[in-house]
Image (spheres, grey):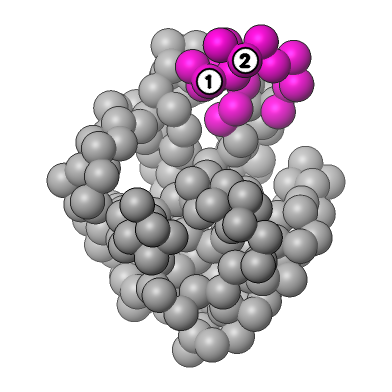
Amino acid sequence: FSFEEALYAQTFPNWWIFPETKTKKWKWLGEAFPPKVAEHLFNNYVTGKDLVLLDLFAGIGGWGLGAVWSGRFRKVIMVEIDREKCRYLDINFSKLDIDYEIICSDAREIDIIKADVITSSPPCEDLTVLKFFNYNPTDAGTVSLTFFTISYVNKVRPVIAFYENVYRKILRDILTSYGWSVSRFDMSKIIPQKRIRLLGTKKF
């Protein structure tokens, strides 16, 4: 299973630039939100053109790239805490025909930014099976960042917000208690890999 095959499975283009370090580039790609899934969601849940997207946990830019491919957005704003990922976001998005902004910061420390669509895929390590078997005590803040997303979205009140993560009861219960629609989302209908995730949406 080559890295090029993994790129195909995650639906990133073969020209997308990654660090040279093998373990890092595999980790970054494995954590990424598949841009073809983002494109599908935008085309099926979002109407209109010339929209602004705010991605609260950009990673390597899967939501942002999907926004570009959908043709519905005039600007993509990406928030990412990892400075190296911010650098690669700039390298890759500079090749695209889109107005973009990268905010290299903890999402919890940014000001309120008006956007038509908000996306949020906070770190999921806390709720993975791998963490359980590794007895990993590190807290990536999955639950607290979920509450942050809900609060931030309520302040901005975009047309629609998307939340994506591993499917766990605790996340489903939190989101539904705040009025989000939650479903088990089978990405294999769109991308060439079996991947069941939690998808939350909130409309205003």
- Residue at point 54% right, 87% down? 95
Q: Is residue 161 visible?
A: no
Q: Residue at x 25, y 44 (%)?
A: 193
Part of the protein shown in magenta: 124-140
Disc 1 marks a residue whose amino acid type is Leu
Q: Which quarter of the figure has residue 120?
A: top right
The percent coordinates of residue 140 (x first, y second) are: 70, 28
**SS label for mark 1:** helix
Q: Which residue is mark 1?
A: 130
For the point 30% across and 31% down, which residue is it? 196
Position above or below: 3 against 127: below
Looking at the picture, tell me which residue is in the foreground, 151 or 77.
77
In the rendered image, residue 139 lying in the magenta stretch gets the answer yes
Q: Are marks 2 and 1 in contact (CB under 8 Å)?
A: yes
Q: Which mark is residue 23?
A: none
Q: Which mark is residue 134?
A: 2
Percent coordinates x, y for residue 74 in the rendering: 48, 79
Q: Where residue 52 appears, x then y in whole percent?
A: 52, 69
Question: Which amino acid type is marked by label 2?
Answer: Asn
| Residue appearing at x 43%, y 16% in the figure | 168
